[in-house]
Structures are given as C-alpha cells and as structure tokens.
Image (cartoon, rainbow, N blue to C red):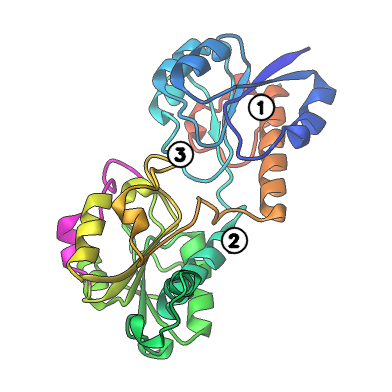
C-alpha cells in the first residue's frame, strides 16, 4: 500500500530523515513550497497524513484533507493546529512534548544571564566603538534575586533546577498550581509579578493566555525587572512591551519568539538596545532536531500502519477502527 504525507514547512534544509523512515514503507513525501493556507488546501486534498512545524493547519486545510488519518506537530505547542476541527473529523493529532527540554531551558537561562550581566548590551555598544562600563544598567548579584516562572511544565522545571544552582530564588505560577513534587513555591500571577526580578514565560498560547503580558500586567511587574519569552510570541503585547521599556518600567527584555514570525526587525521594539532578540532558536541543537524529526516520522508511520503512536493529544478519537 502507498501513502502520501504532506510536510507543510520545515526550518531545516531537507527531508532526508523523514524520507529514510517513511519512503521504504511506501510513503510519498510532498513538501509544500510555502505554508500559506491556499497552498496547503490544494496539497492536502489527497494526503494520508500532515506533518507541520510552524505552518497553520486550519479548519479549511483539515476539511480539504478528506483522506487524512493523522496530523503531526513537529514541536510541542499546538496553537497552529485547529485541534477542534481535527477532533471533529476523528483525526488523531500528535506532538513531541519532551524533545528539547534542556535546549529551551538552557536558552532561557542564557538570556537571563545576558540580561543580568548586560552581556548583549555591552556587546552592542563595544561593537559600535564605545568602551564604557558606566553606560550599562546597574547589575545585581544573582543570589539576591528572584526568578518567576509563568507556567511550570517540563521546561520550566528544568530551568528551575539550573537557576537554583546559580543561587536564584525561584517561584512559579501555573493554572493548576501543581508543583510536581519539586517543592517549588507556587504563587498567584500577581504575586509572581510583584516579587520577580526576572520573569521567564513558559505558558502555552491559548485564548486565555493570548497577550497575557499587556499594559496592565507589565505595570504590575517589579520595577526594573527583566522579561524573558521562549514560549510563544502571542503571549506578549509587543506595543505594551516597548512602552514599558520607554517608561523605564523594565530593565531589559529577551525574546526568542514573535508574532508574526519572522518579525519585522525594523520595528522600534527590536531595535531597542535593551531588547535581546534571537530567531526562535531555543529549541535547536543537532541532537534535539534529529530526535524530533525521527519521532514525528515514526508517529506518522505508526498511525498509517494502525499502531497507536506516542503523545496523542486528542486520545478520544483513537478507537478500534484505528487498530489492525
């Protein structure tokens, strides 16, 4: 039996890893030239599975994919897949929630240190020919400061351990309030904002969390705190962020995620010397990307060969009809 698998987009140069796993069992890979909805609707009409990284698999795309048996997310978050539409069609959706935990935690910690020690700030100034220690914002000993984690999933818990090793006090807020047996102090969102010198965002993007960092929220943060976002760009109101920087409400900001992506880097926020910008790089390491791609390809293969894949996010759709 032959299958057709649509790859909507990929931030790597080829599909060799996916081909090595899927082509030997009769899968033809279709690579979309771009991830816009019109293109995906046309290409999805006759596919058996869809694998997507950042492209939006909308209800219209899912409706067009009448033969689709599986939608796989090349990543953790699910905000670019219409999960309701997929579930209504009985299509299992999978992700890989545990593949880049160390990488994102390391990146968030690196951004925190770059903020704390003025590394990016001084780097920019010295590259411009200015060698002036006094020009930077005041630096404070880490062991006398507090890191607040918004969201307390795998990545946040990993970051907590690393931050504590540096002497930071760590508190967290999550909707569930579950500390997962870590003993971490769980606080309200308002308490976290008021107490934290660094706020690192690890929440999923949803209707409830969209632009959770707006004018009102940023005004409640501790004076001269730093905001770090390695989760989703839509969690932060970028206009409010720029306003907070200009009003000296925030000491520094570090962003790895944006909306849209890529962002318009000519915008004032990204040109501000107290804003650190990295190109959605937190998840990347050679090992993490290889692991992600292999696991997603095997998820696709499992579904097409009627085996239950790992990490089904809508398990209610997996019925006896999916079994051999």
- Going 57% across and 17% down the picture, which residue do you hit? 68
Q: Nearer the viewer, mark 3 or mark 1?
A: 3
Give 269 or 241, whichever is nearer the viewer. 269
Q: Looking at the image, do the residues carrying marks 2 and 1 touch, with CB atoms under 8 Å apart? A: no
Mark 2 vs 1, N-terminal side? 2
Question: Residue 78 in the image: x percent, y percent?
Answer: 45, 39
Look at the image and tell me in which quarter the N terminus lies: top right
The answer to which quarter of the image holds residue 96 is: top right
Q: Looking at the image, do the residues carrying marks 2 and 3 touch, with CB atoms under 8 Å apart? A: no
Give 233 or 119, whichever is nearer the viewer. 119
Is 33 situated above or below 145?
A: above
Q: Residue under circle 3?
A: 78
Q: Residue under circle 2?
A: 103
Q: Nearer the viewer, mark 2 or mark 3?
A: 2
Q: Is residue 257 visible?
A: yes
Residue segment shown in magenta: 205-221
What mark, if any, has residue 131 been given in the picture?
A: none
Secondary structure predominantly adopted by residues drawn in magenta? loop
Instruction: Determine the CA span between mark 2 and mark 1.
Output: 28 Å
Task: State left or right for residue 39 relative to residue 15.
Answer: left
Q: Secondary structure at mark 2?
A: helix
Q: Nearer the viewer, mark 2 or mark 1?
A: 2
């Amino acid at each position: 039996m032959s299958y057709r698998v649509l790859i909507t987009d990929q931030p790597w140069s080829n599909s060799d890893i996916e081909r090595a796993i899927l082509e030997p069992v009769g899968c033809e890979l279709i690579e979309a030239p771009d991830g816009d909805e019109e293109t995906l609707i046309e290409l999805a009409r006759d596919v058996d599975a869809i694998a997507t990284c950042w492209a939006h698999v909308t209800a219209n795309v899912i409706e067009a994919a009448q033969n689709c048996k599986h939608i796989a997310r090349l990543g953790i978050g699910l905000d670019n897949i219409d999960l309701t539409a997929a579930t209504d069609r009985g299509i299992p959706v999978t992700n890989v929630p545990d593949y880049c935990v160390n990488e994102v935690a390391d990146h968030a910690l690196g951004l925190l240190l770059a903020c704390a020690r003025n590394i990016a700030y001084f780097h920019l100034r010295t590259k411009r020919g200015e060698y002036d220690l006094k020009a930077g914002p005041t630096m404070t000993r880490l062991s006398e400061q507090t890191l607040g984690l918004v969201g307390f999933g795998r990545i946040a818990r990993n970051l907590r351990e690393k931050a504590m090793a540096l002497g930071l006090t760590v508190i967290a807020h999550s909707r569930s309030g579950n500390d997962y047996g870590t003993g971490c102090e769980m606080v309200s969102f308002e308490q976290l904002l008021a107490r934290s010198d660094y706020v690192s965002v690890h929440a999923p993007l949803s209707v409830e969390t969209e632009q959770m960092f707006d004018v009102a929220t940023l005004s409640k943060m501790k004076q001269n705190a730093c905001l770090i976002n390695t989760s989703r760009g839509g969690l932060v109101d970028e206009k409010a962020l720029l306003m907070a920087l200009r009003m000296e409400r925030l000491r520094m900001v570090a962003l790895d995620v944006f909306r849209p992506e890529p962002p318009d880097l000519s915008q004032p926020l990204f040109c501000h010397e107290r804003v650190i910008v990295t190109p959605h790089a937190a998840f990347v390491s050679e090992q993490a990307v290889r692991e992600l791609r292999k696991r997603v390809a095997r998820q696709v293969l499992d579904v097409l060969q009627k085996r239950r894949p790992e990490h089904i996010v809508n398990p209610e759709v997996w019925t006896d009809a999916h079994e051999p």
